[in-house]
Image: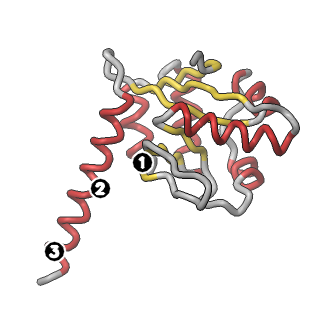
Amino acid sequence: MLAAPIISSNIAAHEKEQAAAVSQVRQSDGGILLFHGTNLESAIVLLNGAPLEIGKALELRHDLGDPGFYLATDFAVAEHFAYTQGGLKGDGGVVLAYYLSNSALTSLMSKGSHFRQIPSASTFRPTGYEFYVPPTAFNQFNASRASGDIRVAPADY
């Protein structure tokens, strides 16, 4: 008997977190704008249309968490990751802006993508949320990108 109220409250809390994250990045046309911080080499590859691949996600995760692709709701958070990833490669890093149409967002979420709090570290207290795209959603992400429902450009901030 006790499990149902707990599950119900967990679902409600999850839905509230998703709504809070989306409200921060919603655009007037219903799409959302998110940011990805990376090194220069990876930025060029992504801007040139490279698809998301599980092998690359496993290689780049650096034992920091779940393999996947991460987008931040806050530019400054993506800038932090650009700096840390760029520093590993000897460049300053790059922040990319990803526009996701409402249909792309809905499709990705049906494949397991979701917003969540960004883990804090002793020297890093992030704001906003991350949009986690798991490997199970990579094919959908790539298809949405090919159709124009996901667009990427260097962030202009």
Report x, y in % for residue 29.
32, 16
Q: Residues within 10 Å of mark 2 (few under 14, many from 20)?
A: some
Identify whether 72 is placed above or below 66.
above
Report x, y in % for residue 22.
34, 36
Report x, y in % for residue 95.
64, 28
Marks 1 and 2: CB-CB under 8 Å? yes
Of 15 and 156, nearer the camera is 156
Q: Residue flagged by tag 1: what amino acid is it?
A: His
Indicate which disc, 3 or 1, sits on the residue closer to the N terminus: 3
Report x, y in % for residue 74.
48, 35
Outermost residue, right side: 90
Q: Which label belongs to residue 125?
A: none
Write down the residue under mark 1: 114
Q: Which quarter of the figure is the N terminus placed in?
A: bottom left
Outermost residue, bottom side: 1
The secondary structure type at the circle numbered 2 is helix
Q: Residue at position x 61%, y 61% from top?
A: 65
The secondary structure type at the circle numbered 3 is helix
Tell me the distance, in whole angstroms, between the alpha carbons under discs 3 and 2.
15 Å
Write down the residue under mark 2: 14
Q: Residue flagged by tag 3: what amino acid is it?
A: Ala
Write down the residue under mark 3: 4
The secondary structure type at the circle numbered 1 is strand
Q: Quadrant of residue 63?
A: bottom right
Of 79 and 41, nearer the camera is 79
Tell me the distance, in whole angstroms, between the alpha carbons under discs 3 and 1.
23 Å
Q: Residue at position x 59%, y 36% from top?
A: 78
Q: Residue flagged by tag 2: what amino acid is it?
A: His
